[in-house]
Amino acid sequence: MAAIPLDLLDRIRELERQVRSLMGSANTRPALDEIIGGRVVIGQGGSLQVLDTDGSSIFYVGQVGPDHPDGTAQQGMLLRREDGTLAFGVYTTDHVNNRVQAIRMFDVKGNVVVADDTKDHGLARPFLTYPLPTTEDVGKWDNTNKTTWTTLYRGNALTQHPKLYAYIAATTGGEVRLLVNGNQVGPTAKGALEFTAPIGVPFDSRIEFQVQAKANANSTIWVSPRALYGVQS
């Protein structure tokens, strides 16, 4: 038998080891519940769906109805509560009169409580009130000649925002301030008061506004609230 060089046998053994390693790797399934340092791409009309334990859809991204007028599929997003009611959606139901997809938030009865305006800008829902116009006749504004803080206007509300924007018109015959639940919010102004500041009470609290003024000595100050808005932080 011819002598086989030892280095050739070593190479054969190494090849066998590599083949066994490759076969083992081929039979090992990668983890399907993690993506580390990568991304998921779903194309060609595919969709992503999360199902509850009973098989009902909780979250869905992909083709939604109705299709576009040219027959192509509309792509959108739906988020549902555990009871199956729609909570949030990005889609349109009318490609003719409302071709832009709206962002909608639904209550448990299916009413749209928050939506963006798809024809121009800003909000479509909810409707927000504007401050009522007040008279330009300063003589008809409420006023005081007292030199101590006097409440001229009082109102009630529920807080929904962390900050308050206020504009209160006033003459220069004294000072103006705004109280929320008896505590001053914002600065004191000599004349018109305008500011944005933390409202200082928890979300959804019942609050009372007081617009107060005090006159300079031997003077009178006239005051007219023009705007009170809740604003973001």
Image (tube, grey):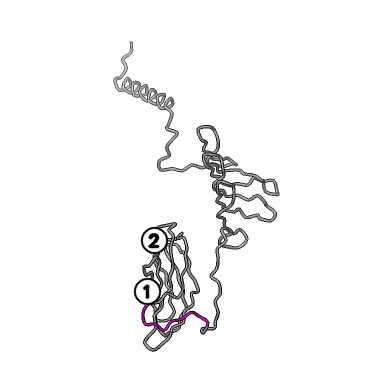
Near-viewer residue (215 or 170): 215
How many residues crowd around disc 1 within 10 Å: few (fewer than 14), some, or many (20 or more)?
Answer: some
Say if the magenta span includes residue 50: no
Q: Residue at x 49, y 77 (%)?
A: 224
Q: Is residue 72 above or below residue 163?
A: above
Please state if 35 lies on the left or on the right of 138 as rendered.
left
Task: Name which quarter of the figure residue 187 lies in.
Answer: bottom left
Q: Which residue appears at 60% of the width and 63% of the height? A: 120
In x, y percent, where is residue 54? Answer: 53, 32
Quarter of the rendering occupied by the N terminus: top left
Labels 2 and 1: the sequence-earlier one:
1
Identify which amino acid the numbered label 2 is placed on: Val
Question: Going by the picture, which residue comes out furthest to the bottom?
Answer: 218
Q: Quadrant of residue 11?
A: top left
Question: Could you tell me which secondary element the residue under label 2 belongs to?
Answer: loop
Q: Amino acid at mark 1?
A: Pro
**Label 2 Cα neighbours within 10 Å, binned few <14 / some 14-19 / many ≥20:** some
Where does residue 10 sit, x and y in percent of width and height? 31, 22
Near-viewer residue (89 or 162)? 162
Q: Report the span colored magenta.
A: 140-148
| Residue linked to disc 1 | 187
Q: Single out the residue that lies furthest toward the left.
A: 6
Q: Is residue 145 above or below residue 30?
A: below
Residue in the picture at 39% in, 78% down? 189
Residue 176 rendering spot, x and y as whole percentages: 41, 77
Query: What's the CA distance linking mark 2 and mark 1?
Result: 17 Å
Q: In this rendering, would 169 be left or right of 45?
A: left
Mark number, residue 201 = 2
Q: Secondary structure at mark 1?
A: strand
Instruction: Work out whether residue 163 or residue 56 is closer to the camera in this orientation and state it.
Output: 163
Q: Nearer the viewer, residue 49 or 23?
A: 49
